[in-house]
Image (tube, grey):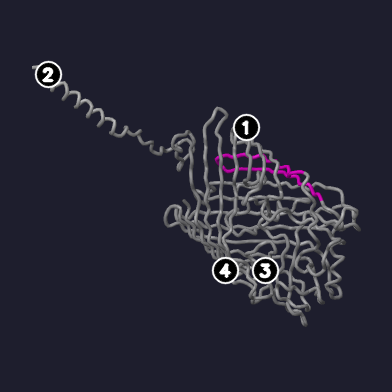
Amino acid sequence: MKLVKSLLLGSAAGLIAVGGAQAADLPVKAKAVEYVRICSLYGAGFYYIPGTDTCIKLGGYVRADMVLGGAGDYGFRSSSSAANGGSNNRLTNYFYSRARLDFNIDTRTATEYGVVRTYADTVFSYDSQNVTGSNPSAFSTGSATLGLYHAFIQFAGFTFGRTVSIFDAPWQSYPAGGPDTIPGGSNHVTGINQVAYTADFGQGITASIALEDPTTQSNGQGNLWNINAANAATFVQGVYGNNGWGGTRSPDIVGAVRVDQAWGLAQFSVAAHELHAGYYGTTEPTGHPSDKWGWAVQGALSIKNIPTGAGDSINLQAVYTDGMSRENFQILFPQSFFMYSGTGVAGAYQSVGFAGISDGVFSSAGGGIETTKSWGFRGGYTHNWSPNWISAIYGGYGALSYSTNAKALICGNFAALGPSAGATCNPDFNFAVIGINTVWSPVKNLAFTADLSYSRLDQKYSGTISGANTAVATAAKPAAVYELKDQNSLNLLLRAQRTF
């Protein structure tokens, strides 16, 4: 019995030991997988970031553009897409293409102070090559470019970072589609660095104030022409002097009041911009003009669901500026440009139209800064034929005028162009755009657009010019007799876009 008992106890101990070893070798039970959960607090497309109470939404679009005809007809000095566009010769692209990817990230977190939001929007583009000079082998690099349109944090009514200006109408410079070069109001669609605060008074009424850095908008600040450094050879390109900005001393101060209702919206905006020049010459002892403040006011009105059909809308805006021209001829509009075409004047080689936009003009001979004034308006009407077809018409107009003293300073170089007897020098101009488009959406978030626009430069110079300073090497234009004449442009945009 003792032997049997010993065997049984030994066997039991062995089984316990083996069982313990096997239990130790078994894997620990895994935690339950935390699946991504839909976040319905902020609309469709938001999900909770696993392990957090923050919701995130990813989105963007892929776009393919083709511009035919003008392809940037005006020689926009600030636009690589239109290099030599105004030449209208063998250096000019008759078509222009772009492939673009837009990608944005939107996160939101509910807190005791309200929602904390971050938003970022990046754009990757690949554009056509351009001939950048009179040498046909000199092409711009056809490489991909990166843009950062939005990168901001919103908290307790404050916005910190980069986004559109509160001065802008909600549609920026596209009241019903159209090209980037519609005048008649502001446009910061590519963003501007700022600190802003918005107060919500209920009933759809809000008021905002912002401090914005004008050097961070696309293509920087406008022109502040130092006539002391003017070059007669660039006059015919719409460049009336060197850009004479000094360092920044104050941000732009911007305010807006807005009412959003079921019928649409109304907005009134104001802005102030410090004109702080450098020196008359290249060194400190040459002196400088005193600072001046420019300003701008803008009104915008949108009317929705008008009697012509459900979803139809009318967007309107008007602006006036004094020393703040970029709130009319906006950041995507070239600040100096030219265009050549035919002529009916006997003995003339071609005709040319050119224009230059500035916030102000100064010279040691003329004293302080002479601010430039402008006004303009835009509008658009959109009609929904069906859920799959939309058409729109739009237009914009901008007028710019220099003071009497500024004209005298600028026109001091006009004589170097060899004007004909009776020719007049007047740098004032008007610019108008009108167009129509149709959008077909065969399926949700896929759109095909055809947009036809006509532009006209109404310049105020008259007569003819001739002599060495009429030559423009980058456009392969020789020194010759040119008629000073208004110019026209016609563009057709074809676009395919998939939004996700």
Question: Label 3: how many residues lie within 10 Å, few (<14), some (14-19) or many (20+)?
Answer: some
Give the residue type that dot 2 points to: Lys
The quadrant in which the N terminus is found is: top left
- Judging by the rendered image, the residue that carries numbered circle 1 is 201
> How far, Cα to Cα, is label 2 from label 3?
113 Å
| 221 lies above or below 425 | above
> How far, Cα to Cα, is label 1 from label 3?
47 Å
> How far, Cα to Cα, is label 4 from label 1?
47 Å
Where residue 162 sits: x, y (%)? 63, 45
Please name whichever residue, 333 or 220, is drawn nearer the observer in this view of the structure: 220
SS at circle 2:
helix
Give the residue type that dot 4 points to: Leu
Sequence-first tag of 2 and 3:
2
In the picture as drawn, the residue positioned furthest to the bottom comes out as: 347
- Judging by the rendered image, the residue that carries numbered circle 2 is 5
Sequence-first tag of 4 and 3:
4
| 431 lies above or below 483 | above
Sequence-first tag of 2 and 1:
2
Residue drawn at point x = 76 percent, y = 65 percent:
238
Sequence-first tag of 2 and 4:
2
Residue drawn at point x = 87 percent, y = 65 percent:
412
